[in-house]
Image (tube, helix red, strand yellow):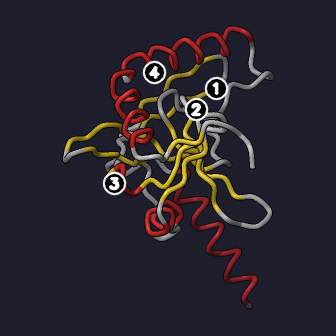
């Protein structure tokens, strides 16, 4: 009975997630068979004080426990994180699951789960990382768009890194 209930819930969630109805705006752009969906981002607002550390080498970002929980709460999963400094929005970041099939070419947090089932968060210039299996044309197009978006937010990014550095929250290596 329990397995049947879980399977029904899974199928219902799968069917609901495939719909394009409601008040969600979808702008689809097809590039060599790869579809990019852009939805209005709604979600979680935090301050830089909610960040425990950021590793420049691995790009892992560690949040305090309450924020980490909110980023993984299956009942109220946000799709955007806005980081504030001094009551001013600094960065708007899409939240992407490591199993998502969407391509997002702007700042994104990838939520990954490993064997110990503890979520880890990685701040990337886009999601997913550029794939070798993509055609050269698609890789170039995606890389170009991500670089353009990174340039647009460069000032905000520099402010973010400087603040984290000044508060000793930057990790500079992959050492353990």
Locate residue 17, reporting x and y percent: 54, 55
C-alpha gap between disc 2 and disc 4: 16 Å
Locate residue 102, reporting x and y percent: 59, 37
Which is in the foreground here, disc 1 or disc 2?
A: 2
Disc 2, disc 4: CB below 8 Å? no
C-alpha gap between disc 4 and disc 1: 21 Å
Locate residue 6, reporting x and y percent: 68, 78
Closer to us: 166 or 99: 166
Residue 5, quarter of the rendered image: bottom right
Disc 1, disc 2: CB below 8 Å? yes
Q: First in sequence: mark 1 or mark 2?
A: 1
Q: Which element carries disc 3, helix, strand or loop? A: strand
Q: First in sequence: mark 3 or mark 1?
A: 1
Which residue is found at the position 73% from the left and 82% from the top? 4
- In the picture of the structure, the residue carrying the numbered disc 2 is 103
Q: Badge 1, how many Cα within 10 Å: few under 14, some, many 20+?
A: some
Q: First in sequence: mark 3 or mark 2?
A: 3
Q: First in sequence: mark 2 or mark 4?
A: 2
Q: First in sequence: mark 4 or mark 1?
A: 1
C-alpha gap between disc 3 and disc 1: 32 Å
Residue reaching furthest to the left: 87
Q: On the picture, is 39 further left or further right than 108? A: left
C-alpha gap between disc 4 and disc 3: 21 Å
> Which dot marks residue 46?
3
> Which dot marks residue 123?
none
- In the picture of the structure, the residue carrying the numbered disc 4 is 150
Q: Badge 3, how many Cα within 10 Å: few under 14, some, many 20+?
A: some
Q: Which element carries disc 1, helix, strand or loop? A: strand
C-alpha gap between disc 1 and disc 2: 8 Å
- In the picture of the structure, the residue carrying the numbered disc 1 is 34
């Amino acid at each position: 009975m329990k397995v049947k209930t879980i399977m029904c819930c899974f199928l219902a969630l799968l069917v609901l997630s495939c719909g394009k109805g409601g008040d969600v705006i979808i702008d689809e752009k097809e590039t060599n068979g790869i579809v990019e969906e852009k939805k209005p981002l709604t979600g979680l607002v935090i301050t830089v004080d909610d960040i425990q550390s950021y590793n420049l080498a691995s790009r892992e970002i560690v949040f305090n426990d309450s924020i980490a929980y909110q980023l993984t709460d299956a009942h109220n999963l946000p799709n955007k994180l806005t980081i504030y400094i001094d009551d001013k929005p600094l960065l708007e970041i899409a939240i992407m699951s490591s199993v998502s099939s969407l391509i997002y070419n702007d700042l994104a947090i990838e939520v990954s789960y490993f064997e110990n089932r503890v979520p880890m968060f990685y701040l990337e210039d886009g999601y997913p990382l550029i794939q070798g299996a993509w055609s050269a044309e698609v890789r170039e197009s995606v890389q170009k768009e991500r670089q353009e978006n990174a340039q647009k937010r460069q000032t905000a990014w520099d402010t973010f890194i400087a603040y984290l550095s000044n508060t000793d929250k930057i990790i500079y290596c992959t050492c353990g």
